[in-house]
Image (tube, coloured by chain):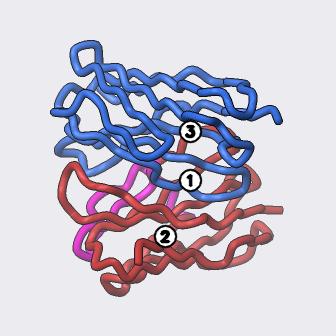
Chain colours: A red, B blue
Amino acid sequence: DTEVTQTPKHLVMGMTNKKSLKCEQHMGHRAMYWYKQKAKKPPELMFVYSYEKLSINESVPSRFSPECPNSSLLNLHLHALQPEDSALYLCASSLPTDNTEAFFGQGTRLTVV
Amino acid sequence: GEDVEQSLFLSVREGDSSVINCTYTDSSSTYLYWYKQEPGAGLQLLTYIFSNMDMKQDQRLTVLLNKKDKHLSLRIADTQTGDSAIYFCAEWLYGNNRLAFGKGNQVVVIP
């Protein structure tokens, strides 16, 4: 099983809403990542969790709040987003060592209205 | 450095070969990757190459690595319409626990 599952696939939310994106993997990977991707651009790293602890925050605004409740799950809590936050949000996982394969989910297409 | 350079657009006829190029700057990278992204989808890991290899072949895919010039290429033989996608090369940044992606190369296959 080399699958990273993200839900929901699509999300439309208002600027005052609170929503969460979910990511799950059962490959025993202990590093998990959130990326943001705008159309036809490369993914931009947002957060990295290693052994369920936040190890990298790429100066992401606080309206994005990550959470890693266990080694298989990664959440991204959203609150008071702006229209410019509309993008494809990708989750990935890998072994927590350098030089390794990272597997990506299919992403959540987020539209903020 | 984290600059990974890619050209942007390639149009190819079905059945022909397509070649996508990429240059990277971090000489300590030991894994280099090619990802495929179809419209509306996530990133699919296509193949990767260790830096101690010059070439890796995987069915229709051939990866060439010129470590001296920090140049990576992906050749797709017998290109099919299902190969239409954006292709990203990526390098693992040693010590930073992250992937650095190229800008991506859109491949359009003409039937």
- Provide the secondary structure element on which disc 3 rests: strand
At a point 46% along the width and 31% down the height, the residue shown is B74
Q: Which residue is mark 2?
A: A65
Quadrant (top left, top right, bottom left, bottom right) of the N terminus of chain A: bottom left
Mark-to-mark CA distance, 1 and 3: 17 Å
**Identity of the amino acid at label 2?**
Ser
Image coordinates of residue B21 in percent, x first then y, are 48, 23
> Do discs 1 and 3 share a chain?
no
Q: Residue A44 in the image: x percent, y percent? A: 50, 46
In what element is the residue under mark 1? Answer: strand
Q: Determine the image quadrant of residue A6.
A: bottom right
Q: Is residue A54 magenta?
A: yes
Q: CA distance from mark 1 to mark 2?
A: 13 Å
In the rendered structure, find residue B49 and report the number of the disc placed on it.
Answer: none
Co-location on one chain, circles 1 and 2: yes
Question: In the figure, is residue B51 to the left or right of A1?
Answer: left
**Front residue of B15 and B35:** B15
The residue tagged with tag 2: helix, strand or loop?
A: strand
Can you say whether A80 is above or below A28 in the image? above
Residue drawn at x 29%, y 67% as measured from the top left: A31
| Magenta stretch, residue numbers | A45-63
Kindly indicate whether the residue at mark 2 contacts the one at mark 3 (C-beta within 8 angstroms). Answer: no
Q: CA distance from mark 3 to mark 2?
A: 30 Å
Looking at the picture, tell me which residue is in the foreground, B35 or B76: B76
What amino acid is at disc 1?
Lys
Q: Quadrant of the C terminus of chain A?
A: bottom right
Disc marking residue B87: 3
Q: Amino acid at mark 3?
A: Tyr
Label 2 Cα crowd, 10 Å radius (few <14 / some 14-19 / many 20+) = some
Of the pair B73 and A109, the residue shown nearer to us: B73
Q: Which residue is mark 1?
A: A36
